[in-house]
Amino acid sequence: MTGQDRTYRAGEIEIAFTETPGPAGPTFVLIHGIGMGRVTFTEVASDLAVQGRVLALDLPGFGDSPEPGSTTSLEETARVVTEFIRTEAPGRVHLVGHSMGTQIVAEIALHHPELVASLTLIAPTVNKYERTATKQAMRMVQDLTGEDPKVIFTGMWEYLHTSPRWFASKLKFMLHHHLERLCPNIQVPTLVIRGEIDRVCPRRWVSEVAEAIPGARMEEIPGRGHEAIIKSAQPVAEMVREFTAPLR
């Protein structure tokens, strides 16, 4: 299903996003990881659109969204996305975040549960046992070793859209953000997903995230790494659809 590219503006903030229409009912909001963009969700968005409307964003400074005049923390970015949701998707939405995106959607779910029908955390970051830039970079390189060319090409193309200064500032904010501190107070239905061979988000860490969120469910994708959403829509989209179907 083909989506329509649109732009949201609020002050100095400009967000490029793609709206993929779907049947009346739920709206899915998809938030990408560091250095990436909404293109990483293209296939997932198309698959989710059989169940409802889908909005996939380029966060400020990534993809087709320009850098704002000042750097923004993850908490500030979450506030921007919150206002985007209020404007573009009134009501309650299904929030889906990947990697750095999990930190942003968790902030929204924690502070604005009235806007969130469900929360999906795919490859939640940052592993508290390896909270350094060096360790995270090493794990990412390990994760990409032997990866599908589609994943590597898409990742490289998206990284070229991001300035090194902006990337470095966001990485710093990521490393100083503690997802695990938010988890016990998240009160919305939550699905946590990791790839079986994800070196960036090991099973021990992701299990702790899932166990810390009241009532959360954890799923693992066989044979997939950190960029599971790029390789193909399945089975991520299927897991999200199955989880959210009863929560309309």
Image (spheres, helix red, strand yellow):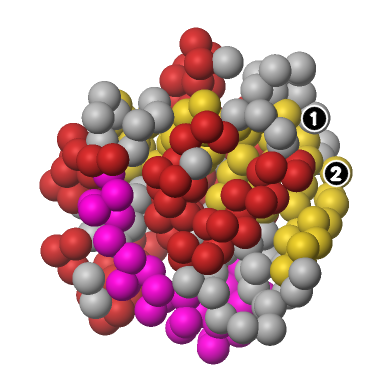
Q: Which mark is residue 21?
A: 1
Query: In the image, is residue 4 part of the stretch drawn in magenta?
Result: no
Q: Which residues are magenta?
A: 158-183
Query: In the image, is residue 182 part of the stretch drawn in magenta?
Result: yes
Q: As rendered, which of 20 and 44 lies closer to the eye?
A: 20
Name the spot of residue 95 as percent of width and height, x first. Answer: 53, 38
Residue positioned 56% across, 57% down in the render: 79
Q: Quadrant of the N terminus?
A: top right
Q: Quadrant of the C terminus?
A: top right
Q: Amino acid at mark 2?
A: Gln
Residue 16 appears in the figure: yes
Q: Amino acid at mark 1?
A: Pro
Residue 236 appears in the figure: no
Determine which residue is flagged by label 2.
4
Q: Residues within 10 Å of mark 1 (few under 14, many from 20)?
A: many
Q: Residue furthest top?
A: 246
Please say if the residues under marks 1 and 2 sit with CB atoms less than 8 Å apart: yes
Chief secondary structure of the magenta span?
Answer: helix
Residue positioned 62% across, 40% down in the render: 29
Name the spot of residue 143 as percent of width and height, x first. Answer: 33, 61
Q: How many marks on residues?
A: 2
Q: Which mark is residue 117?
A: none
Above or below for 238 versus 198: above
Above or below for 243 versus 212: above
Residue positioned 23% across, 52% down in the render: 180
Secondary structure beneath label 2: strand
Q: Residues within 10 Å of mark 2 (few under 14, many from 20)?
A: few
